[in-house]
Amino acid sequence: MKKLLILMLAVVMVCGAAFAQDFVPAAKTGAKSLNFTFAGLGAFGIGPTGVSNFPGKFTPGFGASYFLSNDAAVRIGFQIAMPSGTVPANPPTGKPGTDGSMSAFSAGIGVDYLMYLYGMTPRVKPFAGLGVAFATNSTDEKNGTGNADGTGFIQGEIKNNTNGVNINGTTYFAGTGLSLQAIVGAEFFIYSELSLSAEYDLNLLSLQSSSDQVASQGAVSVTTKSPSFTKILGFGTAGATLHIYF
């Protein structure tokens, strides 16, 4: 029995080695892939709280890669989000009231240059690289026209609230930002044309421009400018991506 187990183990090891030797990943010169990110967005520096949290990660995203050679690839990603919510007027029973609204818009693009290294097996390809990302965010908030004591007021509006707009538990800030990131990770090939990758991005430089908050109440309008900032080095974020090669 012991000899049989040893023989079976040897056969498995030999077959595994042969399978690994025959396996050729699709990642090579001229290859292209579609990238679907589950948590984090490898190429982006766009955060759920807007660019004031730049370059935090965001909701699932979409991108594509093109291999310049067997060991180098360019990756590009896009992202757009338009969350919205309601501001309850909360008038007392029998009193009129109109609910307000709140919304945010977040869009961005990220471009990476990645260098692939030789892994321990053909199925694993570690990589490192640099990425640059641009993001723009805006918010809009309108209050209701009734409140709990029964008094009414003219519906006001705040565009690009410097304190942020909370929509479904997430606070969005307005502004425009640019970031530079260092990237390190590894890609595991399930099949030749299908792989999963995980990576860690370190923020090297973040630039955020100021934004104009405009608060209006009837004919009265007040504009407030938020500060701009530059940040050198910062905490990185992790992401996982599914790659489909063609």
Image (cartoon, helix red, strand yellow):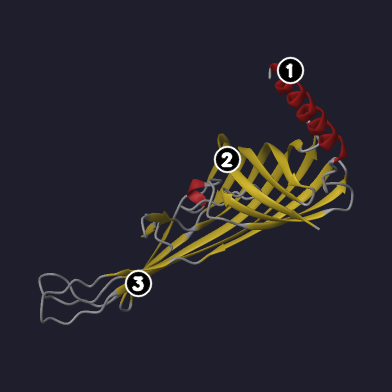
**Residue at the image point whose x is 77% and y is 23% from the top:** 7
Where residue 238 is drawn, which disc sits there?
Answer: 2
Does residue 7 lie above or below 28 as drawn? above
Q: Can you identify the residue that label 3 sits on? A: 101
- Relative to 165, 68 lies left or right: right
Figure disc tally: 3
- Relative to 51, 17 lies left or right: right
Does residue 204 lie above or below 156 as drawn? above
Mark closest to the chain's N terminus, 1 or 3: 1
Q: Tag 2: residue type?
A: Ala
**Residue at the image point whose x is 85% and y is 34% from the top:** 18
The answer to which image quadrant residue 238 occupies is top right
Q: Can you identify the residue that label 1 sits on? A: 3
Mark closest to the chain's N terminus, 2 or 3: 3
SS under mark 1? helix
- Give the Cα separation between the discs numbered 2 and 1: 46 Å
Q: Tag 1: residue type?
A: Lys
SS under mark 3? strand
Q: Tag 3: residue type?
A: Ser
Q: Nearer the viewer, mark 2 or mark 1?
A: 1
- Give the Cα separation between the discs numbered 1 and 3: 74 Å
